[in-house]
Image: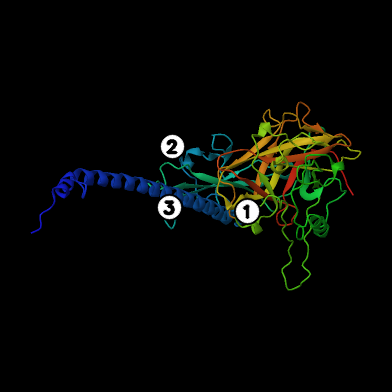
């Protein structure tokens, strides 16, 4: 038997050729602690993924349920039974009081429920793969412009809410989400006796469509003419960079950070362009109005105008008319303006303080996030824009918010516009003045901005203002 040298024996004894029990324990503890960290990261990622899946499912369910209601005959759009009040800040039915419903989550906007219909109020359970929850439905009578509804109730508002089932992986107490939509009686018509406005004239809704034509032109361009304009920027058929609408009409069409003409508000709806090939379904192409702002994912699906995230509403220079480039070179991509041609000699044309903005929109890259849109109404005389007084509860603008902006396709939102007209009850429009509307998206967490679509028959974004006097005629 060969003897072990003393030096080797000493090294073995000192642990240089192996691990002691203490070292094994320490190594095991390090391994366990590291594994716990990795498992925590995996668990966090799993929770985030599931919450994103929940948000997408909620958006899809809300849109699906709203479409089901809108497809019903108007007379059947009402609740089949009256929902009961429930306590709790995260209970949709907490907004029920008797036979009425608070249409706003802050406890305002009390409206009468529409009963004797085919819409089941719920709550009704649903499940999409691992996501579970309950659907709540409400239908209320809404405020309708008197020019249409002076002898009856012709406007309903449908509200659909989704409350998720509480799960450990999805997080507890997720706020319920909702979607609202106005539904007009297709047979509604004003009575033969016109409504009398404060001036003694008849109230007439003034419809103005958002166009993709700058206001230096006397009428909207056709899609073919717009294609020629897009070609100047090397863009395919009708596509073009975003118009800079920060200047005056005389500036003409401008892009990038050079002030140009606002786009036109026009009193006629866009016309359907027939396909030359008879075997194809008649349709109008949908163009991209902001090729300088392209999403990272699926850029070919980017259509209409992208309005990028801006600042807080009160900080946006919406009624500032620029003659020089902005210090913020992207301001024209955050704020877009439309104005009418000048009002001609008249007829005592005036606004009565009621109206609505109808906007076809969806999120960017199908993102699921909340959005607050800022909206200004203003008059332009010469080269100055003036807000229509401090009209919206003391502010020169109004806002419209949705906890989940439409993300799965183009959806029409309706923003009621009810503004102060002062003691006279009217806001006169002098000869030569123009009416304008501006839109931006207020800064907010997880918000990228929105896409808007207009100047297309199926997606006809437009402004409606109740007026007295004779509406102007433009060539």
Q: Residues within 10 Å of mark 2 (few under 14, many from 20)?
A: few
* Closer-to-camera residue (33/350): 33
Q: Quadrant of residue 388?
A: top right
Q: Which residue was labeled with disc 3?
A: 132
CA distance separating discs 2 and 3:
20 Å
Where residue 262 sits in the image (x, y, percent)? 80, 43
Instruction: Single out the mark in the foreground, 2 or 1.
Output: 2
Where residue 304 sits in the image (x, y, percent)? 70, 53
- Dot placed on the residue nearer the N-terminal end, 1 or 3: 1
Mark 2: which secondary structure?
Answer: loop
Number of disc labels: 3
Q: Work out whether 53 lies above or below 329.
A: below
Mark 3: which secondary structure?
Answer: strand
Q: Work out whether 343 lies above or below 223.
A: above
Q: Is residue 8 visible?
A: yes
CA distance separating discs 2 and 1:
32 Å
């Amino acid at each position: 038997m060969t003897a072990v040298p003393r030096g080797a024996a000493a090294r073995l004894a000192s642990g240089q050729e192996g691990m002691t029990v203490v070292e094994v324990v320490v190594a095991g503890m390090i391994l366990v602690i590291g594994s716990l960290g990795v498992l925590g990261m995996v668990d966090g990622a799993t929770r985030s993924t599931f919450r994103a899946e929940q948000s997408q499912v909620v958006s899809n369910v809300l849109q699906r349920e709203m479409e089901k209601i809108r497809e019903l005959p108007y007379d059947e759009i009402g609740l089949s039974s009256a929902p009961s009040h429930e306590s709790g800040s995260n209970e949709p039915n907490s907004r029920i009081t008797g036979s009425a419903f608070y249409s706003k989550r802050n406890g305002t906007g009390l409206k009468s429920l529409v009963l004797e219909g085919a819409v089941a109020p719920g709550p009704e359970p649903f499940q999409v793969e691992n996501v579970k929850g309950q659907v709540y439905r409400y239908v209320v009578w809404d405020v309708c412009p008197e020019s249409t509804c002076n002898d009856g109730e012709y406007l309903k508002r449908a509200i659909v809410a989704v409350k998720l089932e509480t799960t450990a992986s999805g997080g507890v107490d997720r706020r319920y989400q909702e979607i609202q939509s106005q539904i007009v009686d297709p047979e509604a018509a004003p009575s033969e006796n016109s409504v009398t406005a404060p001036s003694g004239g008849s109230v007439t809704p003034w419809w103005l469509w958002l166009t993709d034509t700058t206001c230096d032109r006397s009428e909207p361009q056709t899609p073919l003419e717009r294609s020629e304009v897009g070609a100047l920027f090397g863009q395919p058929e009708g596509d073009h960079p975003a118009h800079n609408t920060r200047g005056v009409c005389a500036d003409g069409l401008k892009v990038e950070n050079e002030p140009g003409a606002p786009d036109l508000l026009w009193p006629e709806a866009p016309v359907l362009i027939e396909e030359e090939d008879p075997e194809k379904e008649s349709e109008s192409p949908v163009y991209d109005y902001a090729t300088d702002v392209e999403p990272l994912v699926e850029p070919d699906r980017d259509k209409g105008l992208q309005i990028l995230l801006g600042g807080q509403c009160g900080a946006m220079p919406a009624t500032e008319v620029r003659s020089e480039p902005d210090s913020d070179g992207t301001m024209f991509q955050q704020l877009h303006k439309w104005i009418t041609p000048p009002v001609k000699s008249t007829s005592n044309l005036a606004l009565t303080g009621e109206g609505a903005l109808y906007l076809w929109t969806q999120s960017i890259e199908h993102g699921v996030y909340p959005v607050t849109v800022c909206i200004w109404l203003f008059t332009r005389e010469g080269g100055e824009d003036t807000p229509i007084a401090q009209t919206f509860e003391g502010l020169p603008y109004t806002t419209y918010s949705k906890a989940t902006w439409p993300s799965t396709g183009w959806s029409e939102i309706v923003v009621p516009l009810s503004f102060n007209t002062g003691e006279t009850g009217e806001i006169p429009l002098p000869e030569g003045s123009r009416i304008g509307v501006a839109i931006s998206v207020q800064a907010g967490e997880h918000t990228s901005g929105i896409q808007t679509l207009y100047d297309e028959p199926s997606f006809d974004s437009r402004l409606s203002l109740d007026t007295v006097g004779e509406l102007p005629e433009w060539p």
